[in-house]
Amino acid sequence: MPASPIRKLVPFADAAKKRGVKVFHLNIGQPDIETPKTVLDAVRHSDFKILEYSHSAGNESYRKKLVQYYSQVGVNVNHNQIIVTTGGSEAILFAFMACLDAGDEVIIPEPFYANYNGFAVEAGVKVVPITASIEDGFALPPIAEFEKAITPRTKAIIICNPNNPTGYLYSREEMEVLKEIILRHNLYLFSDEAYREFCYTGTHFSAMQLEGVDDNIVLVDTISKRYSACGGRIGAFVTRNNELIQAAMKFAQARLSPPSFAQIAGEAAVDLPADYFDATKALYQSRRDLLVKRLNAMPGVFCPNPGGAFYAMAKLPIDDADKFCQWLLEEFNYNNRTVMLAPATGFYGTAGLGKQEVRLAYVLNENDISSAMDCLEKALEAYVALIA
Amino acid sequence: MPASPIRKLVPFADAAKKRGVKVFHLNIGQPDIETPKTVLDAVRHSDFKILEYSHSAGNESYRKKLVQYYSQVGVNVNHNQIIVTTGGSEAILFAFMACLDAGDEVIIPEPFYANYNGFAVEAGVKVVPITASIEDGFALPPIAEFEKAITPRTKAIIICNPNNPTGYLYSREEMEVLKEIILRHNLYLFSDEAYREFCYTGTHFSAMQLEGVDDNIVLVDTISKRYSACGGRIGAFVTRNNELIQAAMKFAQARLSPPSFAQIAGEAAVDLPADYFDATKALYQSRRDLLVKRLNAMPGVFCPNPGGAFYAMAKLPIDDADKFCQWLLEEFNYNNRTVMLAPATGFYGTAGLGKQEVRLAYVLNENDISSAMDCLEKALEAYVALIA
């Protein structure tokens, strides 16, 4: 089981803070946006007397509410096609366990969300990465790359759209390419759409909107980023494939039920006003614009403009991202401030890739992003001189 | 992956209710006891603005509070020896995944909690049952039975104390026997103590109180039954084995964090007055006394007196428990009432065992238990005549 590539830097950040250094956290996807008050209030004003197990698939009232939510984003499902999960994490685990046997293979465009590795290990599944390049802004790798990677053990492809860690937003055309591949080889497509609401260039096209592949698609979802409700641990496993729902339900029943409190929060969230996301989206977009502009203005730095989510990947003039990120915390400060980044090596399945890349989460306000970019600029000057 | 043996009867119960038949649910361990108001109020009065991820091991403040709780029940641990999990379910899964490789074996005295099977399948682990008998009240099987079952692939033993489904409370002497076995063969002992507070005959002796086996013991725990807070989905993986904590933390980090709301509830629960459990325990005990008395008064029925938890196993004069439990829901009613029981076959790993046994959860008030026993008595008369 691999250790979390981001969490291993935490002791260095803690030590920096103990020395009195202010650390700007661009390393994790914990939004600073407030959870909508009505969502928290729904829990606070709840008046049940027994904190009971819910249905293993989640409360029926919540699943019916989710049907309404999905319909608003152009996805038509019924409540029996939804299993409420403990975070998006559990939805991914259920997808692996319900669709793949031990020894089967899953293809994932890299860089990818590092915890897919962990769930693959738990399910005994082999991750086969195919490489997306920063020069292309991390667009979907060509179909030939998928074809090369497919073996008789290949059972599924995972995409995250918009993408964590790259911020790339897959186009409808790219989704249609994926449809061709899964149809040709009879594969599942697991579509992780945790960041659906945060698209800045173009609109989101869900895998569930692909036609004629109902039995192949599993939507992996979560309320964590959508409503800044990461701690609720409420996600969803959604598919129109009835056999798959039956199979996933066995895993859902073994763990009894998803958390009850946050299901109340999730249910209330569907009733947020239609314009709720506008403000948050605008906020993220101006942060993105600031971050990307500042990064590309630094000598030797390249950062493609991400179309969605709240992450950017940047190529830096460095020798080793892990070393650099640790150095930022251990050795560097600028006016007693430094920045914590996620080395991209943890997001690649192919050893040796991502050594010059880092992921930045723009989950801080613009002032802090500015200060963090000041730090990074000075840090790169110093580091480049150091390794010259 | 096996389907839940209890949940498969649910459609028959639903159909009975639709026909207007009142169903007494003695089939599941969902207590009817109210969750303490102060515990729910802690969540209702919380005033954070962002529902954030907690630490992957759970909030430090909660883990420190748990140290205090464990100390009150005679178990000395520090907060770094505790990982807060998503229910006891996840603690079991972490124990399997952190301690056993695919293909390894775990010995469990049967009948046992059916979901151990599900988690074993998820971890690729083989369950090896050794049989406890209803005639002995489900005491620990003799040491020779363990010795016979141990192979080079055996890595762990699981006990649930007090036991679900049998209600059996293992004595200190039996725990010392288990200690001998795990020391002799260098095994882990996973001790599921979800029902610790509910012991009626004798006091609870925790596996964590065994001396000289710190590296071998994993305590699997939950607040679900303790505070009637099943929907919170908060449990704990506890061990003094530091390497094991590190290994389990990788799985904890992959799923990010346990639910935030219910950690607040769990933290508040530790501050309940010292006599909080007295009333609940007394309530369960008089229900137990009533249930066991009524059962043993029925012709051909034998029910050993359970020492703890809120379950009893009874041997009935029937041919097939699954058939009988379904018949109760499908064919039988007495004054338009019937009873839902859990067939014991689902709790045995050995095929063919438990066909004359059922589990009864005494999670209803005494009036309802009385009425349910009236139903069962009449049902047995009718069924015995039917199969004669």
Image: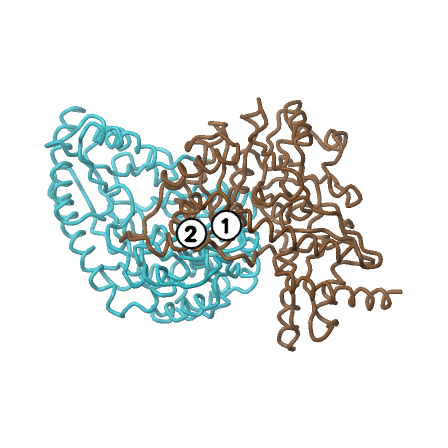
Chain colours: A brown, B cyan
Residue A74 falls left or right of residue A288:
left
| Front-most of residues B185 and A379 | A379
Residue flagged by tag 1: what amino acid is it?
Answer: Tyr
Q: Residue drawn 13% across and 36% down?
A: B375
Structural crowding at the residue carrying mark 2, measured as other residues with C-alpha within 10 Å and reported as few (<14), some (14–19) or many (≥20): many
Q: Secondary structure at mark 1?
A: loop
* Res. B341 image quadrant: top left
User: How far across and how far down the image is residue A61, in percent?
Assistant: 36, 39
User: How far across and how far down the image is residue B385, in percent?
Assistant: 13, 26
Using the image, tell me which numbered label, if any, was put on residue B115.
none
Subunit that carries the residue with mark 2 = A
Residue flagged by tag 2: what amino acid is it?
Answer: Val
C-alpha gap between disc 1 and disc 2: 9 Å
| Front-most of residues A333 and B227 | A333
Residue B194 falls left or right of residue A113:
left
**Callout 1 touching callout 2 (CB < 8 Å):** yes
Q: Quadrant of the C terminus of chain A?
A: bottom right
User: How far across and how far down the image is residue B216, in percent?
Assistant: 49, 61
| Front-most of residues B270 and B7 | B270
The residue carrying mark 1 is A227
* Res. A252 image quadrant: top left
Q: Secondary structure at mark 2?
A: helix
Q: Residue drawn 35% across and 65% down?
A: B268
The residue carrying mark 2 is A39
Subunit that carries the residue with mark 1 = A
Q: Is residue A111 visible?
A: yes
Residue placed furthest toward the right: A388
